[in-house]
């Protein structure tokens, strides 16, 4: 308990230090917070829970530094589980724009604490390259490697983004393809019912009109232990997702951005091979730009 409090204070001090340093030296940066409520239907392990997070996105010259810390709490069913779930995660990303049609990114994710899953203390490393074909079109390839105690996960992401403007409406369309390979080191309950590899694809649409944001997304194809949201979500529990749909609305108010998201996912709990699990997430995000 004491070590956990020290670790929490260290992370918050680093976050505040980054914020204060970035405030004096950068433009077009932001800090924010988010809260997420989630519920599970037909699950034999989980009931509902909440996630709380803070983040910063700092730009200095051609470099971008992003950091997020989140704490999650989920009510579980007793039995089969003996206690409720508590999770702490840290997300880091560095991006450098070479100003010649290329940009480079590196990612890091750390499951700081998970009191139930065997993926506790897992770490993800990522590296990628972005190429801009033209002002409206760019593509990014990022390779992730996740190291857990009993298995590893290799994930290859290929993303293409096309932006355009129709009168006063800014439109961005993103395609996202993920290929995931499971490398089992030791026999374990999390991967014994998983496939060796997975392929999933997503399509996202974002509209900006008169300071209003409208967005939607859909992912089809199975995935497990996936890195999502450009390295700021990690699905480290043994749940095999086969489809996900999301809608969102947001508003710019001066330097503040407010967003509300709804995400629906359909999945299977792999350890017990329990199919037809439905997960609903409602997420509220607040960002301050400076």
Image: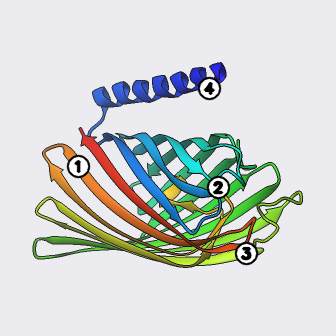
The label nearer to you, 2 versus 1, is 2
Q: Is residue 65 visible?
A: no
The label nearer to you, 3 versus 4, is 4
Side (left or right) of 239 relative to 230: right
Q: What residue did someone put label 3 on?
A: 197
Instruction: Quote the CA–CA distance across marks 2 and 4.
Output: 20 Å
Instruction: Quote the CA–CA distance across marks 4 and 1.
Output: 32 Å
Instruction: Quote the CA–CA distance across marks 2 and 1.
Output: 29 Å
Instruction: Quote the CA–CA distance across marks 3 and 4.
Output: 35 Å
Q: Earlier in the sequence, mark 3 or mark 2?
A: 3
Task: Please say if the residues under marks 2 and 1 sit with CB atoms less than 8 Å apart.
Answer: no
Look at the numbered disc 3 and give the secondary structure of its residue. strand
Quadrant for residue 141, please give it. bottom right
Q: What residue did someone put label 4 on?
A: 4
Dot 3, crowdedness within 10 Å: few (<14), some or many (≥20)?
A: some
Instruction: Quote the CA–CA distance across marks 1 and 3.
Output: 38 Å
Q: What residue did someone put label 2 on?
A: 236
Q: Earlier in the sequence, mark 1 or mark 3?
A: 3
Q: Residue furthest bottom?
A: 221
> Looking at the rendered structure, which numbered label has been put on residue 257?
1
Tally of numbered tags: 4
Percent of width and height locating residue 180: 67, 70
Instruction: Quote the CA–CA distance across marks 3 and 2.
Output: 16 Å
């Amino acid at each position: 308990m004491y070590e956990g409090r020290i670790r929490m204070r260290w992370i918050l001090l680093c976050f505040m230090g980054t914020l204060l340093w970035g405030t004096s030296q950068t433009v077009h940066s932001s800090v924010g917070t988010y809260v997420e409520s989630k519920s599970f239907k037909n699950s034999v392990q989980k009931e509902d829970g909440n996630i709380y997070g803070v983040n910063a996105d700092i730009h200095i010259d051609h470099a971008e530094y992003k950091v997020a810390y989140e704490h999650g709490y989920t009510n579980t069913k007793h039995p089969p589980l003996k206690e409720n779930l508590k999770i702490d995660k840290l997300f880091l990303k560095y991006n450098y724009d070479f100003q010649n049609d290329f940009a480079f990114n590196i990612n890091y994710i750390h499951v700081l604490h998970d009191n139930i899953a065997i993926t506790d203390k897992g770490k993800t490393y990522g590296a990628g390259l972005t190429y801009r074909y033209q002002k409206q079109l760019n593509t990014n390839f990022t390779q992730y490697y996740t190291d857990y105690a009993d298995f590893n996960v290799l994930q290859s992401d290929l993303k293409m983004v096309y932006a355009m403007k129709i009168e006063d409406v800014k439109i961005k369309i993103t395609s996202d393809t993920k290929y995931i390979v499971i490398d089992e080191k030791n026999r374990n309950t999390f991967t014994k019912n998983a496939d060796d590899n997975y392929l999933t694809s997503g399509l996202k649409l974002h509209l900006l009109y008169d300071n209003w944001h409208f967005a939607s997304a859909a992912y089809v194809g199975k995935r497990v232990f996936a890195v999502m949201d450009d390295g700021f979500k990690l699905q480290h529990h043994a749940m095999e997702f086969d489809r996900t749909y999301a809608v969102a609305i947001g508003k710019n108010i001066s330097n503040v951005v407010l967003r509300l998201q709804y995400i629906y996912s359909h999945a299977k709990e792999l350890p017990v091979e329990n199919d037809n699990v439905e997960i609903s997430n409602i997420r509220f995000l607040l960002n301050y730009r400076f």
